[in-house]
Image (cartoon, grey):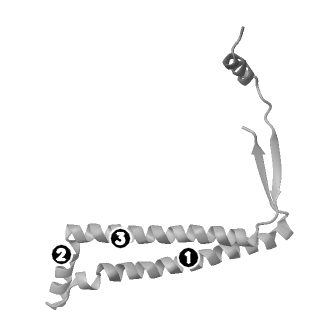
Amino acid sequence: MSSVAEKLQRKSQKATAVKQVRLKLVYIDFWSAVKLSFLIALSGAIIILAATLMIWVVLNTTGIFDEVGGLIAEILGDETFSLTTTLSLTNVLMYSLIVGALNVIVGTALGAIGALLYNLSVRMTGGLLVGFTNN
């Protein structure tokens, strides 16, 4: 008598034939490309904000802003100059938010333009040939 596990083991030892499928990508849906590029650009903007926050915290904690600010004040000869007021957390995050918003706008536009250009070029090239296998 053989158990179910032994039957499954014998069944899995059989060599399966590799099937190949070749497909042509002849159309990219415009709105799907816009939505995907928007999400990718939005995640990039969030990463930019988080990285900016972490870098600012590290630089502020280690006292680099104070040392560089003192060096710049000494070079300029201005005792009232302070790098920590110029590069405060709110200023840095505001600049980073502006860069992130521009990243979202430009990234979404580039995704839409890329989909349009691909759909126009398919008429001349016939599309992109993609091959798939089952293993």
Q: Residue at x 78, y 29 (%)?
A: 16
Secondary structure of the residue carrying numbered label 1: helix
Q: Nearer the viewer, residue 52 or 67?
A: 52
The reply to whether the C-beta atoms of the residues labelled 3 and 2 are less than 8 Å apart is no
Between the residue at mark 3 and the residue at mark 2, the CA separation in whole angstroms equals 20 Å
The reply to whether the C-beta atoms of the residues labelled 1 and 2 are less than 8 Å apart is no
**Kind of residue at badge 1:** Val
Mark 1 crowdedness (10 Å alpha carbons): few <14, some 14-19, many ≥20 = many
Q: Earlier in the sequence, mark 1 or mark 2?
A: 2
Q: Which mark is residue 53?
A: 3
Mark 2 crowdedness (10 Å alpha carbons): few <14, some 14-19, many ≥20 = few
Secondary structure of the residue carrying numbered label 2: helix
Secondary structure of the residue carrying numbered label 3: helix
Q: Quadrant of the C terminus?
A: top right
Q: Name the residue carrying label 1.
A: 104
**Kind of residue at badge 2:** Glu
Q: Name the residue carrying label 2.
A: 67
